Image (cartoon, rainbow, N blue to C red):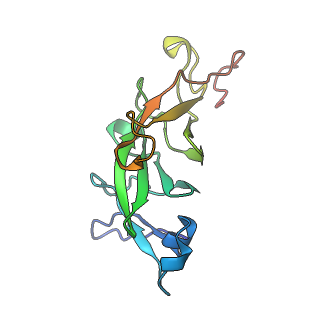
Amino acid sequence: MIRRFMQPSIQVYCTITVAIACCVAGVDAQCTLDGSARLLASDGAPEDYFAHSVSICGDVAVVGVPYSGLDYAGAAYIYQYENFTWVEKQKLTASDAAAYDWFGQSVAIDGDLIIVGSPFHDANGGEIEDAGAAYVFRRDDNGTPADRTDDVWLEEPDLLEADVPTAGAF
């Protein structure tokens, strides 16, 4: 369930409530009746739109934050369920991040792959405005496949539409 809290007079960080998080993570034998968690970005700021997009696969959750950073360049956060709690593991950003890209507008995870949408990424060195891009991140187990606690996610070459019209928003 996604919850947004917007109050103009105070700084409020948007949060996400992961209902029955331990069951989603496949450890339903140890679930409590509540079984919920509240995820926050360690460096979150007002109006980042934390949890604009969310995807969960097994014990990993990806949270998109399209308005994060320098002029809405965007980010995505990876959380892993460890010892009955969700732990922030890594902040993903585009290697070629630019203002108003909205990286994190959409996110998806499937096993060892994460894909993050950036609908307003400019293509051809800025020649094609708002062409859009999809960034793929692959899990690297650091040589310890049995221990997922030290995994990192590495950016693969990004996906770009080959024939993007001006302002295509791929």
Is residue 135 positioned above or below 127 on the image? Answer: below
- For the residue pair 102 and 30, the one nearer the viewer reads as 30
State which quadrant residue 114 falls in. top right
Give left or right: position of 111 versus 51. Answer: right
Image: 115 above or below 164: below
Please tell me which residue is depicted at 34% across the width and 63% down the height of the picture: 13
Examine the rendered structure and indicate whether residue 21 appears above or below residue 168. Answer: below
Residue sitting at x 39%, y 70%: 84
Q: Position of residue 154 (x, y in %)?
A: 44, 31
- 156 displayed left or right of 78: right
- Find residue 93 and report its horizontal and vertical position in percent: 40, 35
Residue 95, quarter of the rendered image: top left
**Quadrant the C terminus occupies:** top right
- Would residue 52 appear left or right of 45 to someone viewing this image? right
Q: Residue at x 39, y 52 (%)?
A: 48
Residue 138 position within the rendered picture, expressed as x and y whole percent measured from the top left:
51, 33
Residue 97 pos. (x, y %) = 41, 28
**Residue 104 versus residue 129 in the image, above or below:** below
Q: How many marks?
A: 0
Residue furthest out toward the bottom = 33
Q: Quadrant of the N terminus?
A: bottom right
Identify the residue at image location x=54%, y=55%. 54
